[in-house]
Amino acid sequence: MKSIQMIRMTERIRWKFYITGMLTSFSFLLSYTQPTLKSSVNRQQILIGEQFTLKVEASFSAENYRLKWLTVPDSMQHFEVVTRGKVDSVYSNSQLTGITQIFTLTSFDSGKWTLPSFKIGIQPASIGKPYDYFTDSFPVTVSFSVSDTSSQLRDIKPIREVEVKSKLWYWIAGGILLLALLVFLIWRNRRKKITPSVPLVRKSMLSPYDEAMDELKKLQQQNFSDPLIMRHVHTRIGEIIRQFLTRQENDNYLNKTTGDVLIFLKQINVSTELLTATAATLRLGDAVKFAKYAPPPGETEGSIAAATSLVSYFKQQVRSKPAAPNADKL
């Protein structure tokens, strides 16, 4: 009876050793888990000048590995870095287990481009050669406007027979319009002879900088709580910027689109922050003018500040450009 009890006790002790050894081996394997790297972007289609984010996450054991974090240049082919987020550390049980960083980027070149991958160096704490991990590369489409893919194809309509009508009435209507045009021209010519000529365009006595700053100060004095006044302010901001560029550059920017203005500012190496703020200001003005968008007062003050910074930038730069013919008429 005693021998049977001794055998059972021996087997129990043996199983305890087995279980303890397996747990120890499992913990040892977990401590040497390979680092993992994950990268993602929040959007892969943007308008020119819009921003998107690149998020990079690395998971590793700080006891077994050392990381040489990635380096993202301020400017790369087709892309520029707007802001760099802080490098956040992730801890578990007071141990460093991961690193995360978010980058905000933009592009002012229309087309389909590939955001390149970036290198992260891995150095094992114990014996082992260092090696590199690379983030994923992402295709990003930069366009002036988003294409509409929601429209459906329409069925082909049946052929309609064309009714043949007499063209006599077209000749009669054309003759009446021609006669009315002649009467109008004769009346206007006689009116010019009677009415003394008055110059229609008065050249501004202020410099382009002083004129723009004076107009922006007038906008700051408006009542932003009135929606109608606020729409007028945002429309005027875009007109002031284009009028300033027209006089400053001796070229007509009054009919230029927002994309054309941003491309010109990028060509003269305006800073990324100022270029991004100007793009947001002009697009906000377009939304107010064409889509009847009603922005809050804070955005209105920010748009005026962005326009003021742009005008001040040209004041501080020493740029020479020959005057174009008929520049005084712009």
Image (cartoon, rainbow, N blue to C red):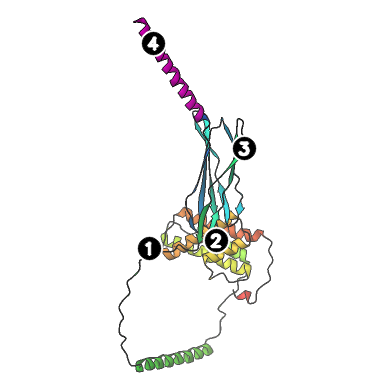
State how far apart marks 2 and 3 are (Cα).
58 Å
Residue 119 is drawn in which quadrant?
top right
Would residue 206 be visible to someone looking at this image? no
* The stretch drawn in magenta includes residue 48: no
Q: Name the amino acid, label 1.
A: Ser
State how far apart marks 2 and 4 are (Cα).
96 Å
Q: Name the residue under label 3.
A: 130
Q: Name the amino acid, label 2.
A: Leu
- Using the image, tell me which numbered label, if any, was put on residue 226: none
State how far apart marks 1 and 2 are (Cα).
41 Å
State how far apart marks 4 and 3 are (Cα).
52 Å
Q: Mark 1 points at which residue?
A: 150
Q: How crowded is mark 4: few (under 14 residues within 10 Å), some or many (20 or more)?
A: few
184 up-or-down from 53: above or below: below
Name the N-terminal-most of marks 1 and 4.
Answer: 4
Name the N-terminal-most of marks 3 and 1.
Answer: 3
Q: Mark 4 points at which residue?
A: 7
Q: Mark 2 points at which residue?
A: 216
Quadrant in which the N terminus is drawn: top left
Residue occupying the point 63% across, 77% down: 326
Which-is-in-front pick, marks 4 and 3? 4
Q: Give, as a single range, the part of the protein colored magenta.
A: 1-29
221 up-or-down from 60: above or below: below
x and y percent of residue 156 in the render?
Answer: 33, 74
Asked if labels 1 and 3 touch by Cβ distance under 8 angstroms, the answer is no
Would residue 65 be visible to someone looking at this image? yes
Q: Name the amino acid, label 4.
A: Ile
Q: Residues within 10 Å of mark 1 (few under 14, many from 20)?
A: few
In the rendered structure, the answer to whether residue 153 lies left or right of residue 140 reads left
